[in-house]
Image (spheres, rainbow, N blue to C red):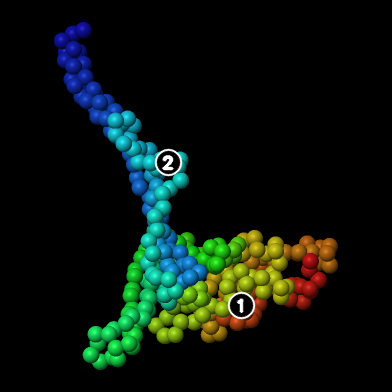
Amino acid sequence: MTSKKLYTWNMRKKTVFPLITLTLLLLSVPVTRARAENSIVIHDDGTISLFITHGFVLGASDDKTKSKPSTSPTSPPAETSVSLTRLHTESKITVTPPINDDKKIQVTITSVTPTQNPSSPVLPKNQSVTTTKTIEENVNEIVAQGTDEKPILSITSPTAHELQIRQQNVAVTTALPLQIDSLTHSLGISSANQPATISVLPHEAVQGMIDEGLLDTKSLNGMKIYLATDSTGITYNVQSERQGRLFGIIPVASPVQVILSAQNGKVVKVSQSILFTILGKFVK
């Protein structure tokens, strides 16, 4: 090997070997990333809890001399909970759609608690006063539970500026801010004035349309429901496709749109083909 080639080889060794060593060191560094999923649970007794789920997405250190966290990629994530309100406390939970796609719902909990104020020079000694407490959280999900601890409904965010209300197998999308009462679990639309109550929940609304013959079980596939407000109040705008067989023989299908009041369950408007309007009762 000539002196020129030998010099070139030595220079490559000085450049390449440190790069290989640095790469191996970087690959050997433990990579961990914590994941925290927050959810608020409204219990049947009116208490509200914040649940935080922690987990490790990528592996822990391979150094046998160091202690490792008990949570591994394959083990169930650890969960902690914090009580945000006291038992039987009346609270209003305002739910606002997120402004971006991080799926974090903005939640404001306003609780009113009666307290004794014997030291007040104005009020009688035994007269109680109310204390208002406000808590703000950003969470991934809100769950309202029944007496059996099963969810009555849940609220998540599929995308920016939208909320999704889910009851059983029915999902409803809305851009409206929502409000839940912690004691009654009633759902409504939050507003600066008196909140409007949603008396007919999503599953009940769909079942009512099936009972009226406007939808059938086949229509549930691909069904889209949007909760909005108009001149008639709060409404469900249901878009689906009605399928069946005319006189039990001829297969027919047509888009159908049903607008139903979320406050009294009455049908506001039905848009479908003339065939289904005239002969709908003969479609099975």
Q: Is residue 28 above or below residue 239?
A: above
Is 198 drawn above or below residue 75 in the view shown? Answer: below
Q: Name the spot of residue 272 as percent of width and height, x first.
A: 68, 73
Q: Within the image, what quadrant is residue 93 found in?
A: bottom left
Q: Quadrant of residue 266?
A: bottom right
Residue 73, numbered circle: 2
Q: Which disc number belongs to residue 80?
A: none
Q: Position of residue 219 (x, y in %)?
A: 67, 64
Amino acid under disc 1:
Leu
Expressed as whole percent of the image width and height from the top left, the position of residue 10 reads 18, 16
Is residue 74 in view from this perspective? yes
Residue type, numbered disc 2: Pro
For label 1, the residue is 260
Q: Earlier in the sequence, mark 1 or mark 2?
A: 2
Q: Is residue 260 found left or right of 128 in the rendered image?
A: right
Q: Quadrant of residue 104?
A: bottom left
- Outermost residue to the top: 1
Q: Is residue 160 left or right of residue 125?
A: right
Label 1 close to label 2 by CB (< 8 Å): no
Question: Separation of disc 1 and disc 2 at Cα?
Answer: 46 Å
**Vertical position of residue 56 compared to residue 261: above or below:** above
Q: Nearer the viewer, mark 1 or mark 2?
A: 2
Disc 2 secondary structure class = loop
Q: Residues within 10 Å of mark 2 (few under 14, many from 20)?
A: few
Residue 23 shows in the view? no
Quadrant location of the C terminus in the rendered image: bottom right
- In what quadrant of the picture does the N terminus appear? top left
Front position in the image: 185 or 131: 131
The image shows residue 129 at horizontal and vertical percentages of 33, 85
Query: Which residue is more in the foreground, 22 or 105?
Result: 105
